[in-house]
Structures are given as C-alpha cells and as structure tokens.
Image (cartoon, grey):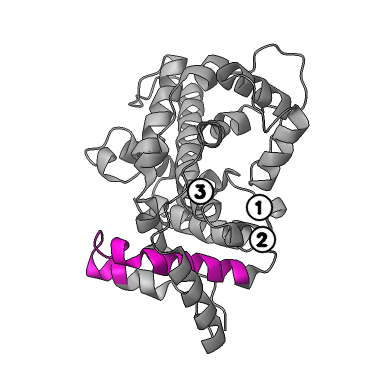
Amino acid sequence: MEPWRRAISKLREQLEEQCLIRRAELRRFQRQRLVENLFVEIGKSRDSKATDIVMSYWLFCGSPWQNQLGYNHAQDQHFAELRELGWQPQFRPGRDFDATANELSWRLDSLASWIEAEEGLILWRALYNNPAAWDVDDPVARRQALDAELIAKLPTLTKQVSDWASARLIESLGQWTRPQWTKVLKAATNSAGQPEKHLTELESWVWWRYPIFSRYHWSAAEAFRAALEKFGEIPELKNEAAFQSTWVRRGLRFTGSRKARRRPPFWKFVINEDVPKDANLGRSMVIWIPYEKSSRAT
C-alpha cells in the first residue's frame, strides 16, 4: 500500500505544479507520471522488488480491499481492457519468468494509466468548471479562482466528509492578503448555487479513452476518425486540426505519428466500450483536496 500512497501523493503534487500553475496550452495531463512514480517508490523498498510489484498489482486486482480503494472507475476500465485481450483480472504467474514479468509490467502500466486518468479528472473538472482558473495567464489568479469555487461549495462539502477532512479543506486554501481575500470571497458569493457544468459525451469519451490513445500511440488523425465513427459529424470540430488544437489546449496531446494503418490497436474497444458517466464523479473533489499540497500565495 505504501508505494501506491506515496506515488499518488507525488502525482497530486505534479498535477498541481505542472497543470494548475501553467497556462492552458502548456498543461499536460495523463503523461504516465503515476507508473513512473510507483516504480521509483518500489525501488526505494528494502524488501524484494519483485514481491512489491506483485503485491502492488494484487492490492487493486485480487485483494479483499480492491473495491474499497476509491478508484472503481479506473479498475473497471482496466478490467475492460484485460477482457479485450482475453485476460483474467487476477494475475497468475506462469512458469516462464520473462513472460510473467512482461505481463505484470504491462498490467501495472495499464492500471496506473487508468488511475492517473481518474486522479487527473478531478483537477481537470475543477478547471473545466471555472473559466477564470482555466484561461487566466496569472497563476495566482487561477489559484484564487479555484479557492473561490471551493468556498462556494463548502456548505455542501462539509456535510459529506468528516470534521478532519473539513479542516483539511480549509487548510488547502491559499494565504491571501486582505484585498485578495475580498476578491476571492466576492467570487465565491457570485458562484454559490450555480449549477456545475457537466462534460459533454465527446469530452468524457476523449478523456477516458486517452490512456489507450497514449499507450498505443494513436495519432490525432486516428482519434478524430474514431470520434467521427462514434459520434457522427462534430459541428464544433470540423477537421483533424481543430480536434487536435482543442485537446492540446485542454491538456491532452496525441503522440502517435501518421501511420498507414486502417485500425489502430483497440479500435473496437475505443468505439464500443462504455466510459464512466460524468454524474458518477461528482464527489471526486472531496477525495482530492484534503491531501493537496497547495501552492500558497504570500
């Protein structure tokens, strides 16, 4: 459990430092940070690394606690990816050491990519619902905008979490000057009671299919073609260039180069597999903020 806890904690710090503080066009979500963090933490262990790797996977895929870890969406997507390959959710080592090691490494890479997608979506949605936090070039102004949103939601959030978590929510707020606090509180008052904007089907689909796009090196052209097949004509995204630039600004980049392949890997999975519903992610912010190592303005 400890390697995962430290790796996810580091991921949260990275998301804040590399996504919250940066301008929209410089943000990069879902960069396989988590799996890199995990193997760094496993490497620090005094115990057998092989045992730690096996146990890290078993915790989410086979242990009695796998459904109590708070990443059910990520687990469901990982298991769906395994089914597409004809594999079982539980990992069973084989006699061939190299084949076993390769399969376990692949499984951890897949699982970590889905967990990172779920973690990243928490911050991504906070930015998505707050244009000032998303678009403003000034990092201090972006932080203030997010604090205003949190304050506006406190009456609801404090009814959903423990007193300890409520205290951590308050501690996560920035240390502002009096004029800055006046600005934050006015913004909170204006946003209180405003309905939350939900992701469109296309936005949710791209976000939750990006682990596949990234790990299997889909190009923007391939992702756009899949979007057209799934959703039909997309009026606001008339061509591949518009599709790509939209998602670059939203923090996702398609790393694959143009290839002469009619169907990239997992084409049917990308088109047909259901993605988590936006409404089911409404309390993710509550999970994330108490552990946030916030940037503090002075």
Instruction: Point out residue 234 in the picture as x, y percentages from the top left corner.
Output: 64, 26
For mark 3, what is the residue?
Answer: 120
Foreground of the two, 142 or 290: 142
Q: What residue type is labelled 3?
A: Gly
For mark 1, what is the residue?
Answer: 27
Q: Which amino acid does label 2 sit on?
A: Arg
Foreground of the two, 7 or 142: 142
Q: In this view, does 72 lie above or below 133?
A: above
Distance of mark 1 from mark 3, alpha carbons? 12 Å
Judged from the image, the secondary structure of the residue bearing numbered disc 3 is helix
Q: Are marks 1 and 2 in contact (CB under 8 Å)?
A: yes
What crowding class fits label 3: few (fewer than 14 Cα within 10 Å), some (14-19), or many (20 or more)?
Answer: many
Task: Give the overall secondary structure of the magenta segment.
Answer: helix
Q: Is residue 260 above or below residue 58?
A: above
Distance of mark 3 from mark 2, alpha carbons? 15 Å
Give the residues in magenta: 141-166
Instruction: Point out residue 121 in the picture as x, y percentages from the top left corner.
Output: 49, 46
Q: Visible in this render: residue 255?
A: no
Residue 210 occupies quadrant: top right
Distance of mark 1 from mark 2, alpha carbons? 6 Å
For mark 2, what is the residue?
Answer: 22
Q: Which residue is drawn at 67% across and 20% down?
A: 225
